[in-house]
Image (cartoon, grey):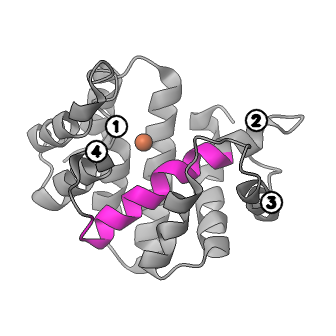
Amino acid sequence: MDREDALDSVRANVENENLVKHMLATEAIMRALAKRLGEDEEEWGLTGLLHDIDVELTEDDMSTHSKLGADLARELGAGEEMAHAILCHNEAHSVPRETKLDKALFCADPLTGLIIAGALVRPDKKLAGLEAKSVRKRFKEKSFAAGANREQISLCSELGLELDEFIELGLEAMKGIAPSLGL
Ligand SMILES: [Fe+2]
């Protein structure tokens, strides 16, 4: 699968620029996780990039969210591992997370929101000056970016990563694409 084709397809299916940015951020974290864990960076990155491709198409019926996404990813050339990770990132389907890729996508997804919120409360609204320790502090404030599911982020433990390392890795990955995120 070609990354440009994947991104074109995301843009063709998702109008909301913030949702596209969420997928770019997830891609960046997934690439960093793959590198850290010695996995396939391209496969993991593309899984992150495509994981919510159906989000606007399924907004009236979230029970279909990620089922359609897995199908769209297959049409783009995704293998079964990638399609499975996309499918099971929506717990509504009760499809258990089995592979490392499944687990990585599940915990990376909400981390993006916590980090973006952390940048947006800064005076300059930029990622550059945001420190991991401040994201860690925000992690403990339940009302801050409440949509970023803390339990889900903590499942980085299933990949053998401590929360501190995961936050640091995610933050550095997102800093690396800050201009694309408008941050
Ligand atoms: Fe997502």
* First of labels 4, 2 by sequence position: 4
Nearer to me, 22 or 36: 22
Percent position of residue 116, x then y: 66, 41
Q: Residues within 10 Å of mark 1 (few under 14, many from 20)?
A: many
Percent position of residue 30, x then y: 43, 59
Report the residue at 62% width, 72% height from top.
Answer: 163
* First of labels 1, 4 by sequence position: 1
According to the picture, the residue beneath numbered tag 4 turns out to be 92
Q: Amino acid at mark 4?
A: Ala
According to the picture, the residue beneath numbered tag 2 turns out to be 120
Which mark's residue is nearer the viewer, 1 or 3? 3
* First of labels 1, 3 by sequence position: 1
According to the picture, the residue beneath numbered tag 3 turns out to be 137
Report the residue at 86% width, 34% height from top.
Answer: 124
Mark 1 in CB contact with mark 4 (< 8 angstroms)? no
Cα distance between the residues tagged 2 and 1: 22 Å
Q: Of helix, strand and loop, which one carries label 3? A: helix
Mark 4 in CB contact with mark 2 (< 8 angstroms)? no
* First of labels 2, 1 by sequence position: 1
Q: Is residue 40 visible?
A: no
